[in-house]
Image (spheres, grey):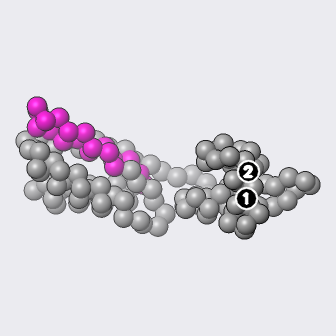
Amino acid sequence: MLYSVEQVASLLGLHVKTVRGYVHDGKLNATKVGKQYRISSEDLAAFTGQPVTSGRHIDVSCVVQLDDVDFTLMSKITVMVTAYGTTPQEGERLRVETVYDQNRRTLKLIIVGGPGRVADVLEFVKTIAE
């Protein structure tokens, strides 16, 4: 897919002149078609640091609930799981969100990403929660 400079600016929340500047400076690869630039989805992915995906991909989502978790343990688990989840790994995306209910002493982890990464996080959670 090819994007116009205006489309890229809208997608990234930037001004059109900023995107043109990136193209002019060589920071964002683009092809000139007539008098306008076009940016491929691969070049946009490389520019934003997102992995280039081709074809179909699979995402897994799950919610893990941990009971009888005090504030100190919640903080420890949240930091560890978030750090583990943000460790870069080639090819699979991952997002981890946490919700803590202090009155009920429950911690919920919402995990979304590629099957391998989600499985790794679940194994990690099992290890630190025991």
Q: Secondary structure at mark 2?
A: helix
Side of 3 where 60 appears, left or right: left
Secondary structure character of the magenta stretch overall: strand
Res. 37 visible in picture: yes
Q: Position of residue 128 (x, y in %)?
A: 15, 59
Check the picture and name the quadrant holding the C terminus: bottom left
Q: Position of residue 35 (x, y in %)?
A: 90, 53
Residue at the image position 30 percent from the left and 60 percent from the top: 83
Q: Position of residue 129 (x, y in %)?
A: 13, 54
Q: Residue furthest right?
A: 34
Q: Amino acid at mark 1?
A: Gly
Q: Secondary structure at mark 1?
A: helix
Res. 119 visible in picture: no
Residue 119, quarter of the rendered image: bottom left
Residue at the image position 41 percent from the left and 65 percent from the top: 88
**Residue named by callout 1:** 21
Question: Is mark 2 in CB contact (under 8 Å) with mark 1?
Answer: yes
Q: CA distance from mark 2 to mark 1?
A: 6 Å
**Residue named by callout 2:** 17
Q: Nearer the viewer, residue 10 or 120?
A: 10
Q: Is residue 1 above or below residue 87?
A: above
59 magenta-colored: no
Side of 78 where 45 appears, left or right: right
Q: Amino acid at mark 2?
A: Lys
**In this picture, which residue range is highlighted in magenta?**
96-114
Q: Position of residue 105 (x, y in %)?
A: 11, 37
Q: Nearer the viewer, residue 106 or 15?
A: 15
Residue at the image position 32 percent from the left and 45 percent from the top: 97
Say the numbered circle drawn on residue 84.
none
Residue at the image position 11 percent from the left and 41 percent from the top: 67
